[in-house]
Amino acid sequence: MQPQSADAPVRPHPGAGPDRSTARVGCPVLVVIVNYKSAPLAVDCLASLEEELAGIPGARVALVENASGEAGELARALDDRGWHGWVDLIEADRNGGFAYGNNRAIGPALAGDDPPRYLLLLNPDTYIHPGAVRELVAFMDTHPRAGIAGSRLENPDGSARRSAFRFPSLASELESTIAMGPVSKVLKPWVVAPPVPEGAEPTPTDWLSGASMIVRREVFADIGLMDETYFMYFEEVDFCRRAARSGWGRWYVPRSRVVHLVGQSSGVTDPKKRRNRRPRYWFASRRHYFKTHLGPAGVVVADLLWASGYGLKRLRDLATGRGNEDPEHFLGDFLRYNFSFRRGRGA
């Protein structure tokens, strides 16, 4: 399926001040934040951006309220803080997911008379360190073949989180589940989440976390908008892979530092709730990714490798008395979503 266009109507909230286009003359970077039941976090994120964007003439924010009922709360926050001069509040007509929400801002911005040079996707459950946006813009300005770049993501204590990854593959599906010494050692080159790169110099990578990811507008012209088939998860992996096929570089820029309160906006990957059951859309996104990039046969092989590896791991855990820290019902849900429903329910 081809990525959907962003031609659905975009309606600024009535309380969000005058109707203004998100594309501004000379706008170097448009920050896009998609909110869903995260209004307090989104306001904190905006507060961290205020001084930073004041130092980048023409920079703006498009805050997309993804039909979670918080438009009024966000509009009041913009009013109270006097942020209407640099933040546009956009109401999506439905909660279509992460890609859908981003496209509601990106599509109209790129269709404007003078589209922004870069678009920075930023999660509402983040806050930036000073210089984070400027570092990304400066890197993109000096690396014309860099299509996408991502920040160093950190925990609140300053420790680094993994945010530069390898593309998922058949080998990585086995590696990610089997967790057996000799096999894992052989499959190490295919680990999706390698250790955080050391040092402060930019590093090429396969894909970046969409929690803080800047994209050159020409990339959208080449490959289109984000694929809205993905409700959540795998959409940035897919986007980076399509960019790679068009010859655009993807870079990790560690001097751009962003704190990510992981899982606070989605609740799925919150480390404090490690055993949260994976929602159906996680499995659907994974399946769509492999079907798009490896074809129907590749999906079957990927599923068999994942299930085989995970089954062997659970048998070993049971035999050795190891506890299970994976999401609840993970294997059963995987088998049900990827085998029982393969010919139905969006398979």
Image (spheres, rainbow, N blue to C red):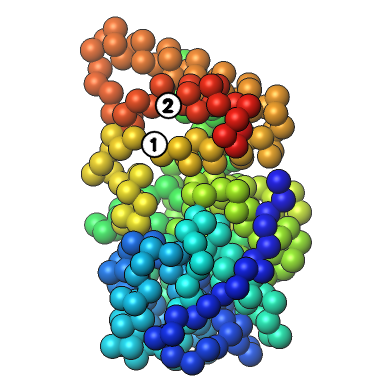
The x and y percentages for residue 42 are 35, 69
For residue 212, above or below residue 59? above
Residue on which disc 1 sits:
278
The x and y percentages for residue 76 are 31, 83
Q: Quadrant of residue 16?
A: bottom left
For residue 43, above or below residue 282? below
Compared across the picture, whether 135 is left or right of 243 comes to: left
Compared across the picture, whether 321 is left or right of 165 comes to: left
| Residue 217 in sight here | yes
Q: Image point 38% across, 63% down: which residue?
A: 68
For residue 178, above or below residue 40? above
Compared across the picture, whether 106 is left or right of 72 comes to: right
Farthest top residue in view: 319
SS type, badge 1 = loop
Badge 2 density bin: few <14, some 14–19, many ≥20, Cα 10 Å: some
Q: Quadrant of residue 300?
A: top right
Query: Which quadrant: the C terminus?
Result: top right
30 or 3: nearer the viewer: 3
Q: What amino acid is labelled 1 in the image?
A: Arg
Residue on which disc 2 sits:
333
The x and y percentages for residue 3 are 68, 54
SS type, badge 2 = helix
Q: Image point 33% across, 63% down: which residue?
A: 38
> Which is more N-terminal, label 2 or label 1?
1
Q: Are marks 1 and 2 in contact (CB under 8 Å)?
A: yes
Q: Quadrant of residue 278?
A: top left
200 or 183: nearer the viewer: 183
**What separation in Å lies between label 1 and label 2 (alpha carbons)?**
8 Å
Q: Image point 54% across, 41% down: which residue?
A: 285
Q: What amino acid is labelled 2 in the image?
A: Asp
